[in-house]
Image (cartoon, rainbow, N blue to C red):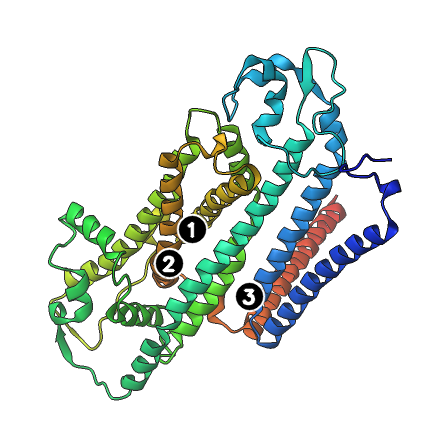
C-alpha cells in the first residue's frame, strides 16, 4: 500500500476514481470527435469541399499523433532498458552540467527536464537496470517531455496555419468589392486610346526605373511588400491578363471567386506535416547543443525566406509593368499583361507554396518550442538560454505571422495566377469531378487499347511462325 502523499498503484486506487477519470477522457474525446464531424457536415452542406478536405487532413494529423503516442508508450520499456556507455552522454548536450558527478543524468538531459514532471506512466524516473558504467538510452522523464513536445508542435502548426489563412483570406475577401466594381463598369466602357505611362498600373509599378536599373528595381520591390502590397490597379490589370489568356470567351469571369477556391485548395496542402518537415525537426533537436545558439540563428531563416518571397512576388508585378511600358507608348482599350511561368523561380509557381509551407511550420516550431520550455521547465531553465537570445526570437515569430498573413499570402494568392497555366479550381466542384472522371476513363481506355493491340501483334507473330 502506498505511503501518505505517494501515488497508489492501480490495484489500490478506488474504482470510482478510475471510472470518473476514464469517463472524463472519453467524454472530452467524443465531444472533440463529434465537433469535427459536424464541422465537416457543415462544410459539405455549404459546398466548401476544399476546406472539407483540409479538415480531413487535420484528422489525419491527429491520427498520426495518436500513433506516435502509442509508439512512445509501447516502446518506453525497451528504450529505458537499452543501455549505452556513460561516456557517450558527454557530447552534444543542450545544457552544461553542473558537475561531473551528474554524468549519469546526461542522457536524460538531452531531451529531458531540469525539474521533475508528470511521466508517461507511474514509476521512479531515476530507476535504472543498467550495469555499472552504463546509462539508459533515454529516461522516462525525457520520453514524457518529448511526447508532449510533439503534440504541442503539431497542434501549433495547425493553429498558426489556420490563423494565417483566416487573416490573409479576410484581406483577400475585401478585394470582392473591386471585382464587383469592375463588372459594373465594364458595360459602359468602350475602347479608346490610352498613353501607357498615364495608366495607374504603369505609374505605380514602372516608376521610370526600367529593367536596366536592376538594383533599384529589386529595392523598390523589397519595400513595396510592407505597404499597399496589392493595389486596385494591380488587381484590375492581373485579373484582365488572366481572363484574356485563359478564358477570353468569358469576360465576366469571377476571378475573385476562382482565386479564393485556389487558396482554399492550397490550405489543405500546407496544413499537414510532411515527412521532410519531421526530418527538419529531428535535425533541429540534434543541433540544439549548448553554446551553439542554434535556435537563435535558425529563427531568422523563415524571416529571410519570407522577405525573399515577398520581394520576388512584388518584382513579378513590376516585370509585368516593364514588359508593357518598354514595348508600347500607347494602347487601345484596357491594359493587358501576359502571364508566364518564366517570371517565377525555375519556372515553377508552386515553389512559392512549398516555401510558405516551410515558413509556417518553422515559425510554429519556434513558438511551440518556447511555450513548451516555459511550461515544462520554467523561464530560468538553461534551455531558455539568455533573454538576449529569446526575446528576438519571439519578436521575429510575431513579425513573420503578421507579414505572412497581411502581405505575403495575399500576394501569393494573386501573383501565382500569372503563370502560364490555370488551375483546376477554374471549374466548379461538379465540373472538376466530371473532368477528372473523364480523364481517368480515357487513360484506362488507352491502356486497354494498347494492351489489346500488343496481344494482336503477338498473336499475328505467332501465326506467322
Q: Is residue 120 above or below residue 203?
A: above
Q: Nearer the viewer, residue 431 or 153?
A: 153
Quadrant of the image occupied by residue 20: bottom right
Q: What x and y, as percent, mark residue 221? A: 23, 53
Question: Alpha carbon of mark 2 to alpha carbon of mark 1: how far?
Answer: 9 Å
Q: Which residue is tagged 3?
A: 51
Q: Which residue position holds label 2?
A: 412
Q: Are marks 1 and 3 in contact (CB under 8 Å)?
A: no
Q: Are marks 2 and 1 in contact (CB under 8 Å)?
A: yes
User: Residue 356 got which mark?
Assistant: 1
Residue at 61% in and 46% down = 151
Q: Residues within 10 Å of mark 1 (few under 14, many from 20)?
A: many
Left-right relation of 382 to 275: left
**Residue 405 placement (x, y as % from top left):** 39, 58
Image quadrant in which you'd find residue 178: bottom left
Residue 202 in sight here = yes
Amino acid at each position: 500500500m502506498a505511503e501518505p502523499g505517494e501515488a497508489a498503484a492501480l490495484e489500490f486506487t478506488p474504482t470510482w476514481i478510475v471510472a470518473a477519470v476514464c469517463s472524463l477522457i472519453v467524454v472530452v474525446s467524443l465531444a472533440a470527435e463529434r465537433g469535427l464531424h459536424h464541422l465537416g457536415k457543415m462544410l459539405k452542406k455549404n459546398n466548401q469541399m476544399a476546406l472539407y478536405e483540409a479538415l480531413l487532413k487535420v484528422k489525419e494529423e491527429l491520427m498520426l499523433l495518436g500513433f506516435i503516442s502509442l509508439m512512445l508508450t509501447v516502446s518506453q520499456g525497451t528504450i529505458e532498458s537499452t543501455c549505452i556507455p556513460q561516456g557517450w552522454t558527454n557530447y552534444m548536450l543542450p545544457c552544461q552540467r553542473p558537475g561531473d558527478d551528474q554524468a549519469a543524468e546526461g542522457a536524460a538531459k538531452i531531451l529531458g527536464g531540469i525539474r521533475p514532471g508528470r511521466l508517461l506512466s507511474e514509476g521512479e524516473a531515476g530507476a535504472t537496470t543498467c550495469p555499472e558504467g552504463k546509462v539508459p538510452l533515454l529516461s522516462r522523464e525525457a520520453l514524457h517531455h518529448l511526447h508532449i513536445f510533439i503534440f504541442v508542435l503539431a497542434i501549433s502548426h495547425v493553429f498558426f496555419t489556420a490563423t494565417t489563412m483566416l487573416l490573409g483570406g479576410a484581406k483577400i475577401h475585401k478585394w470582392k468589392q473591386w471585382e464587383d466594381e469592375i463588372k459594373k463598369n465594364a458595360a459602359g466602357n468602350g475602347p479608346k486610346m490610352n498613353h501607357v505611362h498615364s495608366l495607374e498600373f504603369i505609374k505605380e509599378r514602372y516608376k521610370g526605373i526600367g529593367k536596366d536599373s536592376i538594383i533599384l528595381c529589386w529595392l523598390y520591390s523589397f519595400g513595396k511588400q510592407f505597404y499597399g502590397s496589392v493595389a486596385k490597379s494591380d488587381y484590375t490589370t492581373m485579373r484582365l491578363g488572366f481572363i484574356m489568356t485563359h478564358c477570353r470567351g468569358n469576360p465576366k469571369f469571377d476571378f475573385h471567386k476562382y482565386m479564393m477556391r485556389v487558396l482554399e485548395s492550397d490550405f489543405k496542402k500546407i496544413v499537414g506535416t510532411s515527412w521532410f518537415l519531421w526530418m527538419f525537426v529531428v535535425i533541429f533537436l540534434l543541433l540544439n547543443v549548448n553554446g551553439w545558439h542554434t535556435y537563435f540563428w535558425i529563427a531568422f531563416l523563415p524571416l529571410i525566406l519570407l522577405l525573399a518571397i515577398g520581394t520576388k512576388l512584388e518584382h513579378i508585378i513590376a516585370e509585368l509593368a516593364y514588359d508593357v511600358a518598354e514595348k508600347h507608348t500607347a494602347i487601345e482599350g484596357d491594359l493587358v499583361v501576359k502571364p508566364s511561368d518564366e517570371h517565377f523561380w525555375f519556372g515553377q509557381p508552386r515553389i512559392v507554396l512549398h516555401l510558405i509551407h516551410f515558413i509556417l511550420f518553422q515559425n510554429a516550431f519556434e513558438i511551440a518550442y518556447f511555450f513548451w520550455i516555459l511550461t515544462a521547465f520554467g523561464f530560468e531553465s538553461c534551455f531558455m538560454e539568455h533573454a538576449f537570445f529569446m526575446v528576438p526570437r519571439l519578436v521575429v515569430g510575431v513579425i513573420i505571422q503578421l507579414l505572412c498573413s497581411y502581405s505575403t499570402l495575399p500576394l501569393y494568392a494573386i501573383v501565382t495566377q500569372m503563370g502560364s497555366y490555370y488551375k483546376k479550381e477554374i471549374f466548379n466542384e461538379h465540373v472538376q469531378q466530371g473532368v477528372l472522371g473523364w480523364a481517368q476513363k480515357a487513360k484506362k481506355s488507352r491502356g486497354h487499347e494498347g494492351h489489346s493491340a500488343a496481344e494482336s501483334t503477338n498473336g499475328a507473330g505467332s501465326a506467322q511462325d
